[in-house]
Image: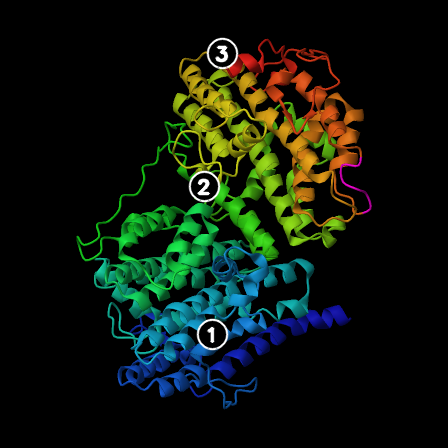
Amino acid sequence: MMKLLQFFLFPFVLFTKFTTRIDAASNGSDDVTETKLLDGSVVTRSPVKDQANLAYDVREMVELLDSGNHAEAQEIYTLGKYSLQFDQYGNEIPQKRTLASLSQNALAGKFKNEMTYSFHLFGLSGKKSSKLNDHSTYAHDFVMEVLADPNSGRIAAEAAVALNLWMYVVHEMWDAVQDCLNAVEADQTESYLALTNNQGKGVYAIDEAIAYYIGSDQQGGSGNGFSLYTLVQDAGDLFGKNSPEAEVNAAIKEFYFEARTAMSFNDACTTRSNTVENLYSITIKMVQKMYIPLVQMLIHSLRAEDGVRTQMYAYAIIPQISQCKSDTFQSLKALLLDREEYFKADFEKIIGLLQESYPCLGITCADIGAYRTDEVAQCADPPGKLPLAGYSPTSNVVEESRIDLDILQIRSLLLMNKVSAADMIYRWGKNSQSSIGSNGPFLSLQYLATTSMRSRVDPFYDQYVSYHDSEVYADAMIRSAMEGAGKWKSVTTGQLSEFVSKTLQYQVMFIIALAYLNEAYDEICDENNDKKDIDAASHSWDIGAAFLIGSLEGHTEGGDMNNGLLHWNLVNNMADKYDTLNSNGYAKANSQLEDLLYAGKGELRAYDCEDVEDIGRKMATIIIMPIVQAVIAYALQLEGQGIGSSSADLAGGEAIATAILPILAYYEPQTAEVLVRNMIMDKDTKPVIDGSQAVANALYPLIDQFGIECKDMGDISGVNACSSSNTGSTSNADIVGRSGILAFLLIPLVFSISHIMQ
């Protein structure tokens, strides 16, 4: 009876709760159910006039600062004047909405799990997760510092827009995503109470976002206002991007209309729709567009040698680059955030580093434009077929290669304990705008971890599925860790971050890279495929290469030892540890892998399937060897740890061991148990309890089975995987012939790794 009553009352409760909030927000405003902005070209579905009126506070701050009255300007900033607030009954309250509160709300946890704000604190803290709280109110702190300087002019008002308002608009969009997600989860569990507590499923939040962004009395295509819309107009005018409305402003309006449309359907934010995914992708793209004016104004300030504005816009955009290539961020931080003044001689270097960051920020050279026509020329966006660590694809796989940025950002967010934000990137993607298996604009790691295409990797896939008793084994491990199930409930953020990122790197990406190499083979060599599409085969081969190498390796021969994240980087790092680098400073194995990638594509184009199979077997050996080496390296690091250690390496060691365990268990179940006992985390057991040499010995069957010469495996700190073996021999036990590029485990291995690396 109670459930039936809840069912009939639910629509009334939801309507009452939502309209109470709307009425409370609109009491005292001209509009009751909507707000007209930008000459009526934008009409919200809820009353947000008071939010738009915050622009009047900025206007009055400008007037006071221009007259040198910093004290009264500070009063407007901290106490407010024009943006009214109301209680839950619609009665006006004495406290006004203030520009200061937009930043100070962080102290109450308002932005707690939002990825854009989290990356900003990550950058300001120098990527030290323990120091995030030191920068919670960075925007407010900057404005107050400038207000205290009587010679700062109107910069405090500009900072209130570029720092406080900018992040709060972004917050409102993330709030809409979270409201919608809450509604989906409530619908899933039939939680009527939860369904009534999501602020209109995000409708109100997106209306607030556009009201803050545009501001009251703003005219379309004009710089007459005092909110973000006018800041964007000013920036666009400097870079020739207005006609008359700035391209960014036009895009933001379109994103608002897209979001509003997504929310207009009856089944919006339910399990029967993909509204939350749509809102998520709209928010990501909107934030990317909002980076553009910050970059433009930083370039303008640098060129004008305006020290305070340079500091302000550096403060606004450089911390966001902490989600990108680490070396690039650290260089920009040193040049712009760590110094008290900007040196003109660094201009070209700074511009180059900024431009390096554009792809990671989701923007292009064309988005930024040329500063004052020819003062700073528009940069050229890189071509789609640039080399990946020296390997030159013949098709465009730039977007696929950027999947490593998702792993990098998930790792950082988990290190900051921002699990829900990390989960969004895992589920819906962020950086790779690839059409591969995607329902939205981004390729997601969860798709790669669960796609049936992985079954092409025969026999690895079957070994993984059999060992874990799950077809989505990697996804299950990642979700279990992020949800805090079982032992993951009590791990440190460092351990969680390390386990999830290493699982993505060396289980998800390892298998999917091999799957695409195998697809390339099947395009040409599968007897049941009559099309023989060489272009499709070449593209699949290039995707496999992109998933092995990644974007963070850069374009130069050998890659980037410090920044890469995928298998190529593991090979380089293990070569460094095991002293098998070539004369150019990168792994001999990667040099050979590059040659094999070229050779494999050539043989595909020549329709020579037998040679492609041989190349596949050689590649597999090179790919497997560094995983074995990494397990031993982790064992060495961990054997000195005590029971209950909080070292992140414990989780990294488990992830890398789990990448090889199913294969080892297939050949030698007993030695696989040695790996489990020593490398899988257990709070009540000392790590590597049998010692690192025992772990190395347990791995010998794989070295033997894959035909890896012991002298090429090498040793590390005296630990040798072949110490108790008949070195140099290879075993072909239980081998049965099978066709296909990745049937290397079941075909006689008639080559040696030493021959490959000569």
Q: Name the residue: 32% across, 68% down.
A: 308
**Residue position marked by numbered label 3 in the rendering:** 611
Q: Is residue 331 visible?
A: yes
Asked where in the image residue 282 lies, by quadrant, the reply is bottom left
Locate residue 427, reporting x and y percent: 56, 48
Asked where in the image residue 8 lies, by quadrant, the reply is bottom right
**Mark 1 Cα within 10 Å, few/some/many (few <14, many 20+)?**
many
**Mark 3 Cα within 10 Å, few/some/many (few <14, many 20+)?**
some
SS type, badge 1: helix
Indicate whether 62 appears above or below 740.
Answer: below
Magenta stretch bounds = 684-689
Residue 468 located left or right of residue 609: right
**Residue position marked by numbered label 1 in the rendering:** 102
Instruction: State the residue in front, 423 or 210.
Output: 423
Q: Name the residue: 37% across, 75% down.
A: 146
**Residue position marked by numbered label 2 in the rendering:** 402
Asked where in the image residue 751 lies, by quadrant, the reply is top right
Amino acid on which disc 3 is placed: Asp
**Label 2 or label 1, whichever comes before in sequence order:** 1
Q: Which mark is residue 596?
A: none
Amino acid on which disc 2 is placed: Arg
Residue 401 located left or right of residue 422: left
SS type, badge 2: loop
**Label 1 or label 3, whichever comes before in sequence order:** 1
